[in-house]
Amino acid sequence: MDKQSKVDATYLVGLMSGTSVDGIDAAVVKLFPSAEKEHGVEIELLAFENTPFEVQVRNSIFDLFDPASATIDKVGAMNMWLGELYAQATLSVIGKCGLSPSQIFAVGSHGQTIYHAPEENVMGGYNLHCTVQIGDGAVIANRTGIPCVSDFRVADMAMGGQGAPLVPFTEYLLFNNPEKTLLMQNIGGIGNVTVLPVNASPDEVFAFDTGPGNMIIDGLVSQLFAPMTMDVNGEIGAGGQVIDELLKWMQQDKYYTMPLPKSTGRERFGQQYVAQIIEMMKVNNWKVEDVVATATYLTAWSIVDSYERYIAPQHQAEQLLIGGGGSYNKTLLRDLQHLFAPHNVQVLTQEDIGGNSDAKEAIAFALLAYYTMKRLPNNIPLVTGASQPVVMGKISWPYIGRPQEA
Ligand SMILES: Nc1ncnc2c1ncn2[C@@H]1O[C@H](COP(=O)(O)OP(=O)(O)OP(=O)(O)O)[C@@H](O)[C@H]1O
Ligand SMILES: CC(=O)N[C@H]1[C@@H]2OC[C@@H](O2)[C@@H](O)[C@@H]1O[C@H](C)C(=O)O
């Protein structure tokens, strides 16, 4: 880093609580202009903290995924409650790296998605794509004294986009490689991939949700191995065999052949879907570890199938770089390595390249917020299907303004 970059460094906090509802990821990043790339930025991760949700919070969020139990009073209260928890997570992670809140330029908070409907929905003559993320930015701003950018996705939807995925914009900024075509694969609740062709320009980047990430595995484990909520390190799946009949049934979901751009969520692969699998398991007398092994294989298959169907015809990739909690599931990694071997695609995790699988999305929302604060566009229309670039995110200012800095 040169002297000028050090002078221009900006500190930001990014917050992510994703579709798997495991907790809050909070990152403090130092951002400075890239010495190499024009308009580019570089970042340094200064601190990261994951705060798991308490059971009552997790259950209250799950209540909101079912439109029948998600009454408006519960949505309103949870919006404020999560705001409080996000504010605490912000202050805690800032404390970890010895900075004070007054040194932070902005917090970028994704919020908790409780509803995502990116498909065509014509009402009153308007095509209303919609998505709901809660955890109010006003609470975060007023508890921390830091401006908060939240509610990113709706601006993209206002331009006809899917409002997802948003992380590709930051992957383009941070990972674009002059020599290799990279597949940036996130495996959270949902799986999503960003394709970065060799030395890509923004209009060559494309991305989409590949299907379920850990969502089906987590759903099965929560039902069949409670109080566990995940297949830790893939140990349950490692002890099972893939059930062909179940795999074929799962592979027939329409999502896998839908045209791009596409995104998905709990509405498709959540509790109802898992309940169907458990019903089939009972009828067929399948072993629970075989069902978990099959769900794990399905996730790996959906990723390689996406590569074969939408990516490989134009781009031979060198590496699949995995981020998100799925990178800790060894059975899933084994299945991915096996399925990508014939394509000569090397499968690596963020840790293998010196990154942090857990922190990646929180870092992304810090970076997205930086662009919002600078009033610069931060979506990629080719990725989301929006008709044009927009500045995503709503800014909440703290009540008494920021402490005056010297
Ligand atoms: N040690 C582990 N072993 C196996 N799986 C793990 C482990 N740690 C995390 N996971 C999986 O990762 C999930 C959390 O991943 P992550 O935090 O990336 O998802 P998310 O951000 O909530 O989802 P999304 O990116 O879809 O919004 C957990 O629910 C679990 O399934
Ligand atoms: C609506 C929503 O919350 N979508 C998430 C989800 O989790 C992964 C995948 O599905 C992706 O589309 C998105 O999140 C990441 C952060 C994104 O927008 O890039």
Image (tube, rainbow, N blue to C red):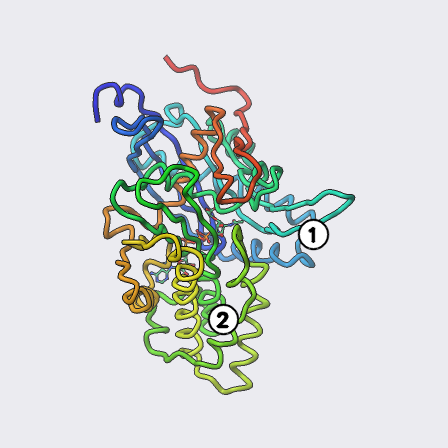
Q: Is residue 335 above or below residue 65?
A: below
Q: Is residue 257 above or below residue 352?
A: below
The residue that mark 1 highlights is 71
Q: Residue furthest left?
A: 2
Report the side of 368 relative to 70 (left or right): left
Q: Nearer the viewer, residue 385 or 216?
A: 385
Q: Are marks 2 and 1 in contact (CB under 8 Å)?
A: no
Position in image of residue 172 (x %, y %): 37, 40
SS class, disc 1: loop
Asked which quadrant contains residue 160, the reply is: top right
Q: Residue furthest front?
A: 313
Amino acid tagged 1: Thr
Q: Which mark is residue 251?
A: 2
Q: Nearer the viewer, residue 272 or 255?
A: 255
| Residue for point 55% across, 44% down | 385
Q: Does the residue tagged 2 have its C-beta within 8 Å of any atom of ligand 2?
A: no
| Residue for point 58% across, 36% down | 155
Q: Residues within 10 Å of mark 2 (few under 14, many from 20)?
A: some
Position in image of residue 400 (x %, y %): 53, 20
Amino acid tagged 2: Gln
SS class, disc 2: helix
Q: Is residue 339 above or below residue 7?
A: below
Q: Nearer the viewer, residue 133 or 43?
A: 43
Work out which quarter of the rendered image holds the N terminus and state it: top left
Report the side of 216 relative to 174 (left or right): right
Q: Nearer the viewer, residue 378 or 294?
A: 378
Q: Nearer the viewer, mark 2 or mark 1?
A: 2
Q: Residue furthest right?
A: 124
